[in-house]
Image (cartoon, coloured by chain):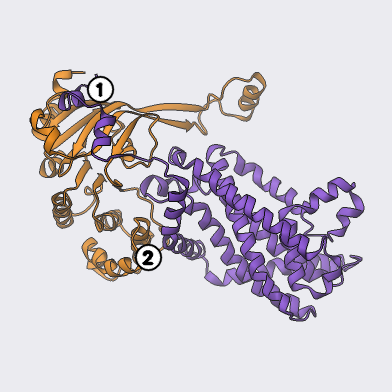
Amino acid sequence: MANTAVANLHPRLTPAELAQRHGLKVANDRPPLREYTRQVWAYRHFITAYSRAKITSSLSNTRLGQLWQVLTPITNAAVYYLIFGVILSQGRGSIDNFIAYLCTGVFVFIFTQTAVANGTSAINANLGLIRALHFPRAALPITVTLVQLQQLLMSMVVLAAIVLFTGEPITLRWLLLAPILFLQTIFNIGLTMVMARFGSKVADLKQIMPFVLRTWLYASGVLYPVSLLRDHLPDWAATLMEANPALIYIELARYALLDSNRENLVATPMQLWGTALAWTLVVGIGGFVYFWRGEKEYGRG
Amino acid sequence: MDVAEQTQAPTDPSTVDSQRVPTVIADDVHVIYRIHKGAAANTGATAALKRIVSRTSTPNIREVHAIKGVSFTAYQGEAIGLIGSNGSGKSSLLRTIAGLLPPARGAVYTLGQPSLLGVNAALLNDLSGERNVALGCLAMGMSPDQVKRITPEIIEFSGINERGDFASLPMRTYSSGMGARLRFAIAAAKEHDVLLIDEALATGDRKFRIRSEQRVRELRANAGTVFLVSHSLGSIKDTCERTIWLEGGVLKMDGPTDEVCRAYEGR
């Protein structure tokens, strides 16, 4: 019955044939991967503008506004200083400059942690936007990561001050921080995309993520020297833990910033770079492809 | 359902095929929402536990069949009104045409990228009107240069600055009419092949309505197709010559506005 009207107008053509004849395309069809990548690139201005808007609007109701971007990491560092520097004062064996060691780990880990946590709801929190406007949905998880990247860069300024203040020298290796954070950003974007697609299907994930992320924190050698892993775990488990991407990025950052910690790295710098690069490529590209495959479903909610 | 009513096409069938270019073809479209009932009955912790233990499928997901097999073809230069009571599937149909809501079955074919203009188009309420304009334009795929050029025009058209400098205030300070006007102004700034308008004209005042109806006519003149959802039959009669009547997710009637409106009012 429903086809009667169309059939009468076009006796010889089915709707699909008519559409094809006039070059009409299926609405919300998923573009091929290459085209999709091009679209995401074409929307880069939207992505940056949207990230900036998110940062501005998230703090617009506070009295100190953008100042919080610096105050948050400082407060964070102060709390860790209180606990590990004053209350549990040192006693950390091989680590000479534990405060700087700790803060590097915390700030680098928080970047991944918050991006993943917020990425889980990247689709569901923006359903209004998704159902109102047309843009490649990958823009949303990318935005989540970029917002956190901006926060990380502020933290890095604070961290540089802490590192210098605790007596580390400025070396050329500090420059390595740029490629390290670049790799981590790509890794985060990929992981955020995976979580965004998962989270769009299973809303319960958001409730579980805090526990998963806390476990990851403990497994990443942030709050204690990485060497403890080898001392207390069987060999295979320690090897597994040491391949953990968060730990790899943190160790690389420590390698770049902390001159006093050069002897305590979990692997040689070359090995660290290799593993970091592998993680970045696998998760970055894999996450993007995985997210792209779900592109059609995101409006459904 | 009356088949005879449906076949009243707005134009003579014999001329259709050769001369008119279709812009939207809906082919037996079904839309199904899957809804988590949330705090509704029987979703307590014990009920959830019982479900997991007894392995019954989750009853707190309910399916709402919003559109049940709608088919029609729209052509270049047409303005089509969509009428029907609340919950009859008008907005869902628009979203599906826009490609923002995936159909569960059937397909929608469109020429170019349809653009939906709704009152609930999400802009960021904490940002100023100006930045929302920029953001909205970027989201429609404009380049930063274009955005810079067009922003004053959009602000001007929306008329939000008529009572002082509102463009630089956060959007949460706007009245609902001002917000709707700004959204319409943003969406109307671009040439669309297919423009879908969801009740957006209803909130503006008289002056703005005249301006926006003028803009809708311009968009149509540029060989676009306009869909208009409204509960005000007056504005449908003013802007549309063809009207589709949806009821309970089913296409009840499709034809010239006068006839459909008469049938709708006399139901």
Does B163 appear above or below A27?
A: below
**Residue A43: in sight, yes or no?**
no
Could you tell me residue A24's position as x and y percent?
28, 40
Q: Could you tell me the amino acid type at mark 1?
A: Ala
**Residue A274: in sight, yes or no?**
yes
Which chain does the orange colour mark? B
Subunit under mark 2 = B
Mark 2 lies on a secondary structure that is helix
Image-quadrant location for residue B206: bottom left
User: Residue B131 got which mark?
Assistant: 2
Q: Colour of chain A?
A: purple
Query: Closer to the observer: label 1 or label 2?
Result: 1
Could you tell me residue B138's position as x and y percent?
37, 60
Q: Could you tell me the amino acid type at mark 2?
A: Arg
Tell me: A34 left or right of B226. Answer: right
Identified at 38% across, 59% down, the residue is: B172
Image-quadrant location for residue B84: top left
- Please tell me how crowded label 2 is: few (under 14), some (14-19), or many (20+) other residues with Cα within 10 Å: many
Q: CA distance from mark 1 to mark 2?
A: 45 Å
Subunit under mark 1 = A
Q: Look at mark 1 in the image and give the residue it sits on.
A: A2
Identified at 55% across, 43% down, the residue is: A290
Tell me: B55 left or right of B213. Answer: right
Q: Are marks 1 and 2 on the same chain?
A: no
Mark 1 lies on a secondary structure that is loop
Could you tell me residue A51's position as x and y percent?
49, 61
Could you tell me residue A15's position as x and y percent?
26, 29
